Image: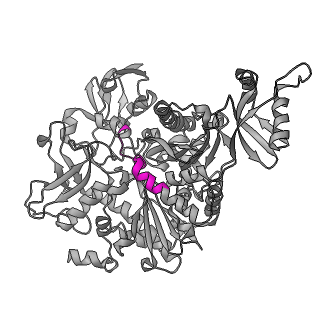
Amino acid sequence: MAKVFFKSHNKEVECEVGEKLLDVARNADIFIDAPCNGNQSCGKCKVKLLEGKCDTEKTVHISDEEWQQGYILACSTKVTEDMVIEVPSKLSSSMHEMKIEGSDKKVDQKLYNRGRKFLDDNGLTYTTNLVKKYIELDKPSLDDNISDVDRIERYVRQELGFSSIDFRLDILRKIPKVLREDDFKVTLTYVKKKNKITILNIEAGNNEKELYGLAVDIGTTSVVVCLVDLFTNEVLERASSGNAQIRYGADVINRIVFAVKKDNIKLMQKAIIEETINPLIQSIYDKTGISKDNVIRVVLSGNTTMSTLFLGIYPDYLRLEPYIPPYLKCPNIMGENVGLNVNDSALVYLSPNVASYVGGDITAGVLSSGIWTSEENALFIDLGTNGEIVFGNKDFMMCCACSAGPAFEGGGISCGMRASSGAVEKIKIDKQTLEPKLTVIGDCEPIGICGSGIIDLICQMLLTKIIDRRGKIQKGLDSKRIRFSEHEIGEYVLAFKEDYEHLENDLVINEVDIDSFIRAKGAIYSGASILIESLGMDFEVIDKVYIAGGIGNNLDIENSILIGLLPDIDRSKFQYIGNSSLVGSYLTLISSDARHKLEEIASQMTYVELSVYPTYMDEFVSSCFLPHTNIDQFPTVKELLD
């Protein structure tokens, strides 16, 4: 046995000799960013060895300077003796301080109102089958000595007109005391179905005013929870954080691979429910003083992998050809079934999936976008960790998923990070001096660059001719910020460590990073192109482009077009619709009609498997250029670059 002391967390962990340092940290609930799930391909799990020795090696992800400072990769290091480790603060803070779409109440209220307008305009109501009713029962006597349950059922039959009631054991356990707390005056919360009701909660006295639900977006990178008053449909409070599953990989493939090893499905389910969603729910209770017993309905939307892991279902066949999901429409479940921090009898609903890589977050997003009621041709693009695209109108909807990877969340980029404090989110480079002007989240020192910043940076480097259209850094430029490694790999320095107090190494982006991002943006563009081509159309038929996902309002449309992420069409056609998955969850929560429409949308969407489409690879390769090998597809960009 050996001991590892994580100085940054003031925590000592005992482990087996030969155990991987990354696994030691994970077992101790110490967050170390490992987007590639420990296969040594991303280099993000750098930690600092302060004391002791270990079995490790210098990789391409560790510079000579970092190696001299004691940096090692946690995924490629085995514990051989007692050691002291420092986890860089930016690794542990990035998840908790993440800048998350859906965390601004005012911005989101506009999006909720927009979604509700689609329901209003199409005659969809805000009724649900949930009811909260105050009743006064006859008191028992020697002449009227029926059981407590029979007394409730008699009232339900005679006064409410239902033929029977149903309830769970936990309700039965509450009934005797609750009935007598206020002289047989109680409030029932129940769901009605034809001539039968199912009691979900029973409270002493008159409490008809409290009935709440939760709308949840389970993102691969981040999670947002909203508390909704089910009487007024008002969003009362929200909470958000990074998805704790991040420690097991940045993308769904790495998480699936991790989940199917040993008994890791339980770990993945624990990470999303006990370590992410439940603490967010509890923080809302703490702020509002609301009892969990009055939270009686939950709607969650996530991609197919996130939903599968949330339910603790074996996920491996999602990633294996022919890519079969375990389910599309989730069976009826209650809060107790999955351990959610709500009423045990709460009705839990997961938005329906379409295919292995198009999940409930997209069906919820389409509901909130209004494509299903539009006469116009709309292109819906979700720019989260996974790239999903929908094209259509009220008559048809086609969809696909792109292998974009985590680049839009900063993953796969050596200097990349999620949108949290210290992340560069906007960049402007002076054409003459090639000096950058950085806008940093939190108005503090830069420690990395997030997705919107990477788009700006590549665009600026192209316009200032620091890189060519292949993404290669040009030699011979007069700037100290441009340099080449011994292997002739070019890099551009965004920030020198000597200019900042807490920056341990120069903040740079290199040609490998640029190439990774070009492939990610190429996947999105080529996916959209092929999806529309499959119908015998081109980008000219698009009337609206809806942008959703984690990059947020900081996405610069002009720059995104210039690098070939988005099509070169009229800029007025583009609209950012925020966290559409969350808005769709909200609409489904407050309206049974919206839930039926959501299920109709899921059944009507046609999935296109890009990997088997004949011309997809050719289009993808052509899109891995700035902006594209066929510059004529980008006429306004062509003018800028000529």
| Quarter of the picture holding the C terminus | bottom left
| x, y percent for residue 233 | 55, 48
Q: Is residue 168 magenta?
A: no
Examine the rendered structure and indicate whether residue 118 appears above or below residue 339: below
Examine the rendered structure and indicate whether residue 527 appears above or below residue 45: below
| x, y percent for residue 238 | 46, 41
Closer-to-camera residue (222/7): 222
At a point 60% along the width and 45% down the height, the residue shown is 231
Closer-to-camera residue (393/4): 393
Closer-to-camera residue (212/358): 212
Examine the rendered structure and indicate whether residue 362 appears above or below residue 236: below
Residue 19 visible in the displayed image: no
Is residue 252 shown left or right of residue 67?
right
Specify start and end residues of the magenta stretch as a single range.
96-112
Residue 570 appears in which quarter of the rendering?
Answer: bottom left
At a point 80% along the width and 42% down the height, the residue shown is 160
| x, y percent for residue 620 | 41, 69
| x, y percent for residue 146 | 88, 25
